[in-house]
Image (cartoon, rainbow, N blue to C red):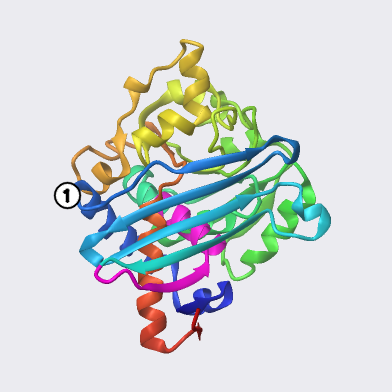
Amino acid sequence: MLLLSEKEIKSIYTMESAIKDLENALVHNLEGKIQNPHRTVLDFPEKKASALYMPSAMPPIGKTAVKVVTIFPENPAVGKKTTQGVILLSDTENGEHLACMNASYLTRLRTGAASGIATKHLAKKSARTVAVIGCGAMAEEQLQAVLEVRSIEEIFLYNRTASKAHEFAGKFHEFKGAVTTLENADDAVSRADIVICSTRSDKPVFTGKALRPGTHINGVGSYLPHMQEVDAETLLRSSKIVADTIEGVEDEAGDFIIPASEGVWSFSDLHGELGQLSAGMIPGRENDEEITFFKSVGIAYFDLAVAAAVYEKAILEDIGTKVDL
């Protein structure tokens, strides 16, 4: 079995590759060639934490995987990471367990890649400004994906704890445009062509009225029914709302579940799924005035797609540690 660390994965695998590999996986899924059982979530309320177990199989590439991710928000206070995870990759031809790799980075990368694909189809071609609402672990790859598909000239950062926004800004010292930290989320949103919302909030972090015409939003932070980082007005102002999977958001996206339960919005208003958007089965942006929204709660075969690609590249480049179990 091959063991791959986060550092090793980062040395051989890029956002550009992740977007391409995820686009291929979306095609396989549309063709009905992927097995993707519903994920199991175990909650630990006393820690405000969760453990997620996500299996999938993709026979066209001969691989199956299970990802285990734990999310413990109180961990930074004791010097540990909020999100920790591993992916076990196996062969569908003979059942051999091929690799065990760090999943935390790949989770952030594939979530970013999904947003990158959505942004490519839903954001204005002329988009030049992006607001990042929530500067935690997931936000870096989200921003990388947007920078991959649009020519961004200015970035606005907002985080509830301002010091985290300033720290985040330092990660993009090679960015040639302007990076500005702001003290108000609505202020950041009102200046942006693209909004990245990546928080664990249980109440909306900006108001829909702050959105200007033509904005595209990627919402990736809330992934449980009680979480809600965008308000109902954002949904009502959005002419196209695309989900990574409709089944996933119906079960887990508080952004949708809460306003639907209040009778102010309906799941029937969803435009469709990311795979349909990527394949051209549903239209993307049709004018520069409409507001669009992409919601992702995550799905296991996204992880499988990037993990399988990482494994093949690691073998080719002789990266990783081989062990006998």
Q: Residue furthest bottom?
A: 318
Residue found 44% across the figure and 30% down from its top: 251
Q: Quadrant of residue 189?
A: top right
Residue found 44% across the figure and 71% down from its top: 14
Give the x, y percent position of residue 267.
37, 22
Dot 1 crowding, Cα within 10 Å, few <14, some 14–19, many 20+: few
Q: Magenta residues?
A: 93-115
Residue at disc 1, secondary structure: loop
In the drawing, does residue 213 fall left or right of residue 58? right
Give the x, y percent position of residue 228.
58, 29
* Amino acid at the residue labelled 1: Glu
Q: Quadrant of residue 187?
A: top right
Q: Which residue is mark 1?
A: 31
Q: Nearer the viewer, residue 108 or 140?
A: 108
Q: Is residue 97 magenta?
A: yes
**Residue 114 vertical position relative to residue 62 in the rendered view, above or below:** above
**Residue 101 vertical position relative to residue 113 in the rendered view, above or below:** below
Q: Residue furthest front?
A: 325
Question: Do we see residue 12 in this rendering?
Answer: yes
Give the x, y percent position of residue 323.
51, 84
